Image: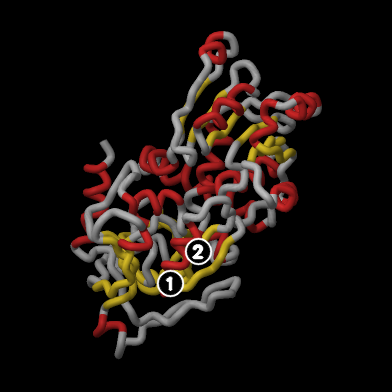
Amino acid sequence: MWRPIYTVFLRSHTSCRRSFAAALLNVSRHRANANVFHFSHSAGLSARTCKALQFRKHGDPCKVIQLEDVDLPPIGANDVLVKMLAAPINPSDINMIQGTYAILPDLPAVAGNEGVAQVVEVGSQVKSFKIGDWVIPRDAGLGTWRTEAVLAESDVISVPNDIPLLSAATLGVNPCTAFRMLSDFGDLKPGDSVIQNAANSGVGQAVIQISAARGIQTINIVRDRPQFTQLSDSLKAIGATYVIREEALRQPEIKELLKNCPKPKLALNGVGGKSATEILRHLQVGGSMVTYGGMAKQPVTVPVSALIFKDLKVRGFWVTQWKRDHSHDERIFRSMLDELCSLIQQGKLTAPTCAEVGLQDYNKALDSAMQPFISTKQVLIM
């Protein structure tokens, strides 16, 4: 179902539509605001190549991803030339390289679906952006693990350039997923509660912070680990109401907890398997469980009694599809980004713990991103 859509969207990769130029100055790794970048005409306009992480076949990311020079096409009237500043490595990126994601590009393809870039040149008909603006992708598939790109004006949307670099780089996927699930699946009010597994994931941390800003309590489930206390403290520091081990969901302590907290209206499932069934059991009558991920790679099992006697709703959410469904109306996407950026500017929404890695060290970043029990997000700095 998705492949034809994605193939059309990414066919420009093979025709160099989304390739880059090589002669833009490097961005500082640690700065609050990026300066405007300028071409080196003697190098950039003649060489017209840049560095990109490409894969020519699906497989183990550490084996199939290669750092290559990629050509840059001329800038059209409705195009922008951007300098990529930073791009995270998300689970969906890994799955896409492995060939297991719902949508797959034509090969060869530049990897990466999220990141932040700075506009360095605009086409003659471009109205939305000026040099120096920060932009993020509107949709999956731009191939953000690269140093520069020529993109259509309609491919990107602006974000403030006074927010932290890592917050901008990780804004388009996880915070948007958390925002939509908290907004679109039930009428949550201050004092209500939400239960979620994968609470230490990027989505989980965004759920905690957005909920806290709205006065919503969160019951956060994480797998047991040697550093549980440290993880629990870090999640509470960003606004988590409760943090409990997955093994405790069937123990008396969860019943004690719910005496001091209303039964959740909403359950957010990023794991699947038994974990999903357990958080479902604690929903109030008429509540909803929304599945946005399946890290356990196990099916979600729903007891018949939960459907009959509690009238629970079981839904799914994919932010890529949401963006495509609302692509005809920029206002709703713009409004969401504005609210998220406002939370960032107020210090109420921070990026997850990140490790900044130079593009040339991509193998190290890929290997770290695929390790279990790792809460640190790998971010490629260009």
Residue 197 or residue 131, whichever sits in front:
197
Assign a secondary structure to mark 2.
strand
Indicate which disc residue 333 carries.
none
The image shows residue 17 at horizontal and vertical percentages of 24, 63
The reply to whether residue 116 is in sight is yes
Residue tagged 1 = 359
Q: Quadrant of residue 350?
A: bottom right
Q: Amino acid at mark 1?
A: Leu
Closer to the chain start, of discs 2 and 1, is: 1
Q: Please, which residue is most extreme toward the top here? A: 309
Q: Amino acid at mark 2?
A: Val
Q: Residue at x 47, y 45 (%)?
A: 333
The image shows residue 151 at horizontal and vertical percentages of 32, 63
Crowding near the residue tagged with mark 1, few <14, some 14–19, many ≥20 C-alpha atoms within 10 Å: many
Q: Quadrant of residue 320?
A: top left
Relative to 154, 254 lies left or right: right
Q: CA distance from mark 2 to mark 1?
A: 9 Å
Q: Quadrant of the C terminus?
A: bottom left
- From the viewer's perspective, is residue 51 above or below residue 323? below
Relative to 29, 67 lies left or right: left
Indicate which disc residue 379 carries.
2
Assign a secondary structure to mark 1.
helix
Relative to 31, 68 lies left or right: left
- From the viewer's perspective, is residue 354 above or below residue 285? below
The image shows residue 13 at horizontal and vertical percentages of 24, 60
Q: Quadrant of the N terminus?
A: top left
Q: Residue at x 70, y 38 (%)?
A: 244
Q: Please, which residue is most extreme toward the bottom here? A: 42
- From the viewer's perspective, is residue 97 above or below residue 321? below
Residue 224 or residue 2, whichever sits in front:
224
Crowding near the residue tagged with mark 2, few <14, some 14–19, many ≥20 C-alpha atoms within 10 Å: many
